Every structure is written in structure tokens, then in C-alpha cells.
Amino acid sequence: MECEFARVNSSNEEILEILDSVKVIAMLGLSPDESKASNMVAKFMQQRGYKIVPVYPKEDTILGEKVYRSLAEIPFEIDMVDIFRKPAAFNAIADAAIARGDVKVFWGQLGLVNNEAAQKAKDAGMKVVQNHCPKIELQNR
């Protein structure tokens, strides 16, 4: 499998500004399994005061939050999508985020890059972060 270099990405300074400004984060692919990175990141972000909105195909609640099956189902504003899905899913996620009209940040987790989807999100006015983890960024402050 060929790795893609993140050509569309926010600077380190912009990443910190993003983390200071967002409040509601939809986490796509948030696993109920406490040993998974997505769960550990979500729990850490919750403890830091962020509202986490799980988007997952199963479960009713994860980390005490109602689980939604898609971005379109979420009935309130979202500041950021944090994606724990394969890069091949990013284009559809970008389309869903654009369709919502309220998502300000399109974030691909550490090791995850899709420049086509990132450019689409950026062209729609979103800030884009790829190949970074918000938990690590907050811990490195």
C-alpha cells in the first residue's frame, strides 16, 4: 500500500488555533473498544471539555454519548469531523461534511491522508488537518 503525503494541511500554529476554537467534534469510526486508539483519543478529548459525537455503524452509546450512524443524522451543529476511517472513505465524508454546511474543520487522524478529499473540504471553506492526532497535539502544548 502506497502512503500519500499530506499536501493539503494546516500549519502547527493553525492546528493549535483549531483546538482552541472547536467545541463539538464528530468522531467517525469511534470504536466502543477501550483498547482502540479512537476510543482513547475520544475519552481524552472528553476529559478536556470537548463534546464528542460518536459516528459508528453499531452501538447505541459510546463513552456515554448517543451514537449516530452518519453525519447527516446529527441534529445539532458540529465544529469538526475527526476521522478514524480508511482514506478511501474520506471523499464521501468530505461530501457529507460539505452538505451539512456547519463543519469548520476536516481532520484525518495520524497516518490517514486523502489529498483529494482534503482539497474538496478546503475549497468548501473548511480548515484541513491530516496525519495528526488532536490528543497528541494537546499533550505537546
Image (cartoon, helix red, strand yellow):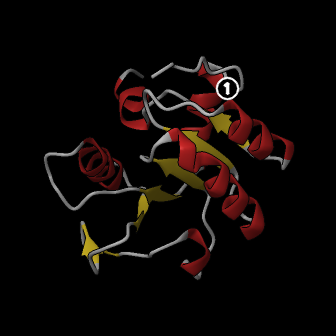
For label 1, count other residues whose C-alpha is less than 10 Å away and answer few (under 14), some (14-19) or many (20+). many
User: Residue 107 lies in what quarter of the image?
Assistant: top right
- Residue shown at the point (32%, 51%) measured from the top left: 42
6 over 27 or under it: above or below: above
The percent position of residue 59, horizontal first and vertical second, equals 26, 76
- Residue shown at the point (63%, 71%) measured from the top left: 77
Q: Is mark 1 on a helix, strand or loop?
A: loop
The percent position of residue 80, horizontal first and vertical second, equals 59, 53
In the image, 141 versus 42, the foreground residue is: 42
The quarter of the rendered structure image containing the C terminus is top left
68 over 50 or under it: above or below: below
Does residue 85 appear to the left or right of 130 in the view shown?
left
Residue 20, visible in the rendered structure: no
Residue that carries the numbered disc 1 in the rendered image = 9
User: Residue 41 lies in what quarter of the image?
Assistant: top left
Q: Which residue lies furthest to the left in this view?
A: 35
Does residue 35 appear to the left or right of 71 in the view shown?
left
Residue 7, visible in the rendered structure: yes
The percent position of residue 7, horizontal first and vertical second, equals 70, 20
Q: What residue type is labelled 1?
A: Asn
